[in-house]
Image (spheres, rainbow, N blue to C red):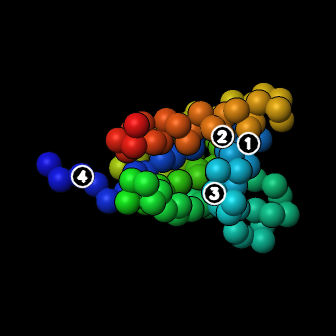
Amino acid sequence: MPEKEHLIVGTAGHIDHGKSALVKALTGNDPDTLPEEKERGLTIELGFIFMYAPEAERQIVFIDVPGHEKFVKTMVAGAANLDAVEEVLRDGAARARTKAREVLDRARKASGLE
C-alpha cells in the first residue's frame, strides 16, 4: 500500500477541556472560525487546520470537533476517517504545553516520522 500524503488527527474530549487551544498551540491557527464560536467560547462546527510536516513530506490535518453533547452528530461526522485521535483532558495550563508536545510526537510516530 502506498504511503499516505497526509495524517488526519482528531481531537476528543468534553467541552471546555482545551481541544481548540491545543490545536492552536500546535499549529498557530485557531480552528474556531465562526463569530458565534468566538462569542460563546465553544466549538460548534468542525474545525480543520492543515500543517505541513516537511521532514515527512506530508500534511498533518487536525480536525477539531465539538465537545458539547448537543453537537454530538457533528462530532461523530468529524471522527470518520481519522488516523489518530488525541483525547484532551482538563489539566493545568503548565501541562498544556506538555500535552501539545505529546500530541505532536504521537502524530509523528503514527505518520512514520520516527
Query: What distance separates the C-alpha of mark 3 from that of mark 4?
Result: 23 Å
Classify residue 29 as left or right of residue 38: left
Does label 4 or label 1 sit earlier along the sequence? Answer: 4
SS under mark 3:
helix
Q: Give amino acid for label 2.
A: Ala
- The residue carrying pointer 4 sits among few (fewer than 14), some (14 to 19) or many (20 or more) residues within 10 Å by Cα, namely few
Q: Looking at the image, which is closer to me, 81 or 96?
A: 96
Q: Nearer the viewer, residue 110 or 87?
A: 110
Residue annotated with mark 3: 27
* In front: label 2 or label 1: 2
Mark 4 against mark 1, which lies toward the viewer?
Answer: 4
Residue, x 48% and y 47% (percent of image)?
9
The residue that disc 1 covers is 18
Q: Earlier in the sequence, mark 3 or mark 4?
A: 4
Q: Are marks 2 and 3 in contact (CB under 8 Å)?
A: no
Mark 3: amino acid: Thr
* Cα distance between the residues tagged 2 and 1: 11 Å
In space, the residues marked 2 and 3 are separated at their CA atoms by 10 Å
Q: Check disc 1 and give the amino acid type.
A: Gly
Side of 62 where 26 appears, left or right: right
List the residue tagged with mark 4. 3
Q: Earlier in the sequence, mark 2 or mark 3?
A: 3
Amino acid type, label 4: Glu
Q: Residue at x 47, y 57 (%)?
A: 53
Residue 84, given in percent of the width and then of the height, sits at 43, 40
Tell me the residue at 18%/53% (across/down). Answer: 2
Q: CA distance from mark 4 to mark 1?
A: 31 Å
Local SS, label 2: helix
Instruction: Give the quadrant of residue 15.
Output: top right
